[in-house]
Amino acid sequence: MLFTSDNWSGIHPTVLEAMMTANIGNAPAYGADDVTARAIGLLRDIFEQDITVGFVATGTAANALALACMTPPWGAILAHKNSHINVDECGATEFYTAGAKIIPLEGQHGKLTPDIVRDAMKFFTPQQPHRVVPKVLSLTQGTECGTVYSADEIGALCDTAKSFGLKVHLDGARFSNACARGKASAAAMTARAGVDVLTFGGTKNGCLAAEAIIFFDQQCGEQLAVRQRRAGHVFSKYRFLSAQWLGFLQNDLWLRLAKISNTQADRLSKSLAASGVCTLVHPTEINEVFVTMPDDLVSTLKEQGATFYDWIQPGDPYKGKLRRFVTSYMTTDDQVTEFSAALRDYINR
Amino acid sequence: MLFTSDNWSGIHPTVLEAMMTANIGNAPAYGADDVTARAIGLLRDIFEQDITVGFVATGTAANALALACMTPPWGAILAHKNSHINVDECGATEFYTAGAKIIPLEGQHGKLTPDIVRDAMKFFTPQQPHRVVPKVLSLTQGTECGTVYSADEIGALCDTAKSFGLKVHLDGARFSNACARGKASAAAMTARAGVDVLTFGGTKNGCLAAEAIIFFDQQCGEQLAVRQRRAGHVFSKYRFLSAQWLGFLQNDLWLRLAKISNTQADRLSKSLAASGVCTLVHPTEINEVFVTMPDDLVSTLKEQGATFYDWIQPGDPYKGKLRRFVTSYMTTDDQVTEFSAALRDYINR
Amino acid sequence: MLFTSDNWSGIHPTVLEAMMTANIGNAPAYGADDVTARAIGLLRDIFEQDITVGFVATGTAANALALACMTPPWGAILAHKNSHINVDECGATEFYTAGAKIIPLEGQHGKLTPDIVRDAMKFFTPQQPHRVVPKVLSLTQGTECGTVYSADEIGALCDTAKSFGLKVHLDGARFSNACARGKASAAAMTARAGVDVLTFGGTKNGCLAAEAIIFFDQQCGEQLAVRQRRAGHVFSKYRFLSAQWLGFLQNDLWLRLAKISNTQADRLSKSLAASGVCTLVHPTEINEVFVTMPDDLVSTLKEQGATFYDWIQPGDPYKGKLRRFVTSYMTTDDQVTEFSAALRDYINR
Amino acid sequence: MLFTSDNWSGIHPTVLEAMMTANIGNAPAYGADDVTARAIGLLRDIFEQDITVGFVATGTAANALALACMTPPWGAILAHKNSHINVDECGATEFYTAGAKIIPLEGQHGKLTPDIVRDAMKFFTPQQPHRVVPKVLSLTQGTECGTVYSADEIGALCDTAKSFGLKVHLDGARFSNACARGKASAAAMTARAGVDVLTFGGTKNGCLAAEAIIFFDQQCGEQLAVRQRRAGHVFSKYRFLSAQWLGFLQNDLWLRLAKISNTQADRLSKSLAASGVCTLVHPTEINEVFVTMPDDLVSTLKEQGATFYDWIQPGDPYKGKLRRFVTSYMTTDDQVTEFSAALRDYINR
């Protein structure tokens, strides 16, 4: 009953196989190899347009490098206060941008709206030379609250952003899960909606370490190569980053794996909601479930071998009662069934 | 009827005279002169303890250099969301600290309390390696809302900060005005209350460009000299920064000038409150007055020659209706009297 | 006849196997797994003392993170002018240290000596507050010229460094090759000689992406974890970095592979020197060979399928005539034999 | 017999008077005042073209802000190894540019030539993605060796720089002295020669703290305002920076004062050269004299009250024997005459 994090999962056999295939013989270093070209080709097909791409090993690197290409040091990045870039990357954005400022915004269920963006922009009038200059709107898809924006919602946010001259970044650490939910295609939720830069995560969903920085706005991507190198984020044996993407994207593996984790999260979520003693604080739309539950239920479940995290959001709105459950492509039917049984036992105790 | 900013005022004749006295002959560069030693001596007397001091020309430089000595790049600085470092220094703190993060906190009338600090700290548990690490509590005295902390309030905040291992920074751009209010002595509100570093502003209150960075925690001040130099904030003819402090501190000029601006702000504040059509949104405790007023009153007053700023706080809580009035040591009785008359005329129109 | 770079080689089967073993089941993220603990244990055995260790994917990241822990932004790093940190990491050291300065020094065959260090230090007298402050001596073992320091040479350099209060960094991108040369043990050339921090490279010598940052001075290593995270250099599935080290270090695979590449470089070097038309500009002590050769020989060899790089050192001392040949553990006897034959054909043409 | 530094001199009465005139009444803050507009107008006249200007208090700030507008963090700045930005600003350039790299070049008497630049550029071929990217050529006029470039020499260097896509920065801390030497006009040595950005120093030559950053390439200057503010280098009472320039530029005061210090340096230089026991190591073309002299002469002169600095250049080419003498507009005929007498006494002892 492992519900700690999708980061605890291993490499999917298909991804591993693609890496082994890429391992035959010598190959040019730093991305000048065939595997890399093919992986980028697959991404181009998925997003239905020309793109500039960099592959790195961590989501933090992907987000921070992307944002550093999007804002000068004196820029501001509007983002949800719960966003990973704001609270869980140890200041990587500030480091990579040489000091740009994240403006934390409130929004229900981890989502922003055009009105929230417009209200935030009131503070940044052009007559205020003392202030940082808003340059980027950063969204997360699926959000840090386990919810998913529709393509229309993203489109409306992009329109609002552009009316203020802001570029749009989409943190897609769990983008596969958002796509697997089936609200819209990957292209419809990004490039076609007006997103400028996507960081697309493969690591949590079956890869070893595979995060793609994808610039739909290719002018904005011109600095990527030099920033990536200067940060020590260019693998010399780059083909092994790229090979993961080959395995991950071919035959829709990425969507199939995400569907597994989404489905298990759905089951878990229903079970928790049906218990009558837990409260779902956000809708479950990807592979994360957020609930408040009685303290003795927490200890009972843990005693029986369930693992999951206490979760504190900024400002601690749930006063220490919030718990997070995460499923992965390795989560089995049995694990969720066992968990549901433990939950029923508690209720019927 | 000039109420735009105390930054519009000139150099007080006594300060100018001190500079002219310092101008006689050649003198060692970079602070190795007698005038500098004497100015530091005066500060030591006022704060009643040994200190490490640097003189710079702007409040932004003073705050940013102070904070850079207090936090590593991965540190967090807890501060009121309206604080000057958070909203009006164009990201200087982020620049000087190489990317430290300001955590904006809510608090009535620009003031923080121990409870607010304790609540904010809940998010930063030691088990969270993904997060920036809180290192500093930054307070402002007088605050950006024109209010003043008592020495006891500062002491309680310092105690709370220290219980979490945070150092305390006090932004004293209008510290003279806070002291002139007479709640406590300069030493009682800083070193004796537990403040580690004070930035003490002279510019707004009669100097040309005189801001002192004062380390009560002298170990923390060891980096100041090299940071100041590396930032290009060491005047070669340092004696002319120091001379301003001689003129400013001798014979309590700093307190006498601050009393003038405080008194004129009091008169202005009473007049606005008595009008019945304006609402004071914060108590007037230093030389700033914050009110909401009808739009046609704003235009009427401006037509009659009054100058003051539209004021937007983060989140725009007063929906575009807030106005700020600032007095200086150069504000005359006549200016306030004329303003009160214009206000009366409007009411009786 | 591939002599471009050891970065073109693949993953050694033993290393790959260790990764596959680590892939069984879920495991704690971010390094809290068993594989990581075991890999660190192996390094501790090799270096015969307690160490603080971080695993990252690139040598640039390893060097830059190490140096950022060793110097403040206003520090200076003394290094050979040909050093990788000075010329081939796109300013990563400057980025990670927030602007520390590399002082490029001249030295024969890529090596520094105590005299060179002492001469350089003359410029940095304590009375000079306008200057950056030397904090680190950075050496490379094996050097960028393909040479190897003896343990005594490193010891003497460490003594000199310490007499000036400098810490010592050792860039070990090809440390395996230096060790395989057999002059001294890994521990004797580092911790016992006085080195404070070693970056030990596995990537060029059979790993996928495996670089270890090893602090012998553990106080200096206290910042490593937070800097690594903030830079996006903490793999969530950390076990796959660690597993490479298990495979690499067990049964001396690292030394056995390095011996292969050293041996092939020796054969190549002898063949080039014996040709009578090429000049070895540096002794061949690891897996790199530096020669000047006639232009028509270059084109003849390339036509016959040999690949190698034109090489320009800072200042271009060989006026465009320098060529670099690199062997790897995948270089075969046949490749070198074929190359030697092509060389003989040219001479006898 | 004060020959330590022109930084020891005071404020010229005419400059002080201009500041006092500017002190009458209140005035808009942050440079929106009339005095500032007039000062910029005077500079425009001198340089005979439209310019973007910022006034700051120190030469270090001026150079570092200028260079930060000229290069990205991954850029390289080619400069003489003795240049102030390379050795005497405590890494300010690295700080302000977020880690750009200064490439130190050798050149006789502190001067660079087109050949030196071309040789340095050989290392930076476009095929080298591992290297920082040269973006700026930085020259100093008058140089750190007390010499002066002709307008033609600067023009040729600018042409060479531009052929490589480099912008040209001119550090003019002693630009007045170079102009006063009469080789060419201020405009001819800068804008007309192809210089993009000049930092023009007033502090050493009669001002309190007056350094102008002047962009002839105005597109390049677009970032200046926000960088200046973010660095805390925008005086709130900006009029007092600008007023110094009014006093300094009107009626050619800047040239008249520089002629005084140049003339005294000429006298000093001749006297030292004629002594037969000292060697001028650089020609004396501005207000600095560099000589080697016997140790006992040094102590004899110091005993008689002469003050001057031991001077170490990078690499210490004069093995601890170099001494620097600097004159200022406050240096009197008598001081030099007294020094010459002391020198004669030593010879005839």
Image: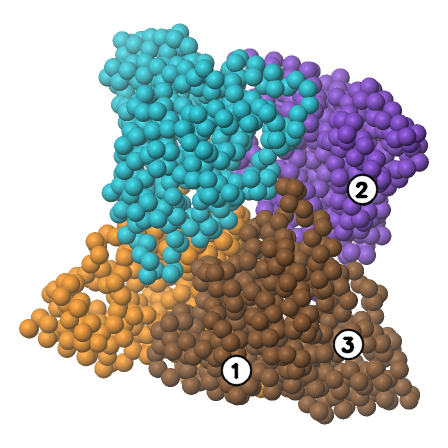
Chain colours: A cyan, B orange, C purple, D brown
Name the front one of labels 1 and 2. 2
Q: Secondary structure at mark 2?
A: strand
The numbered disc on residue D249 is 1
The quarter of the picture where the C terminus of chain B appears is bottom left
How much space separates mark 1 and mark 2, taking CA atoms? Answer: 54 Å
- Name the residue type under label 1: Leu
Circles 1 and 2: CB distance less than 8 Å? Answer: no
Q: Residue at x 78, y 56 (%)?
A: C120
Q: Which residue is mark 3?
A: D283
User: Numbered disc 2: what chain?
Assistant: C
Q: Quadrant of residue C349?
A: top right
* Subunit that carries the residue with mark 3: D
Residue that protrudes farthest toward the left in the picture = B349
According to the picture, the residue beneath numbered tag 2 turns out to be C322
Q: Do tag 3 and tag 2 residues touch (Cβ < 8 Å)?
A: no
> Are the residues under marks 3 and 2 on the same chain?
no
Q: Amino acid at mark 3?
A: Pro
Residue D327, given in percent of the width and then of the height, sits at 69, 82
Give the spatial CA distance, label 3 vs label 2. 39 Å
Mark 3 crowdedness (10 Å alpha carbons): few <14, some 14-19, many ≥20: some
Chain letter belonging to callout 1: D
Q: Is residue C157 left or right of residue D156?
A: right
Whether residue A24 can be seen here: yes
Mark 1 surroundings: few (<14), some (14-19) or many (≥20) residues within 10 A: some
Pick the residue in front: D184 or C117: D184
- Comparing labels 3 and 2, the label whose residue is closer to the camera: 2
Q: Residue C298: where, in percent of width, then height? A: 80, 36
What residue do we see at 25% from left, 72% from top? B307
Q: Could you tell me which quadrant the N terminus of chain B lies in?
A: bottom left
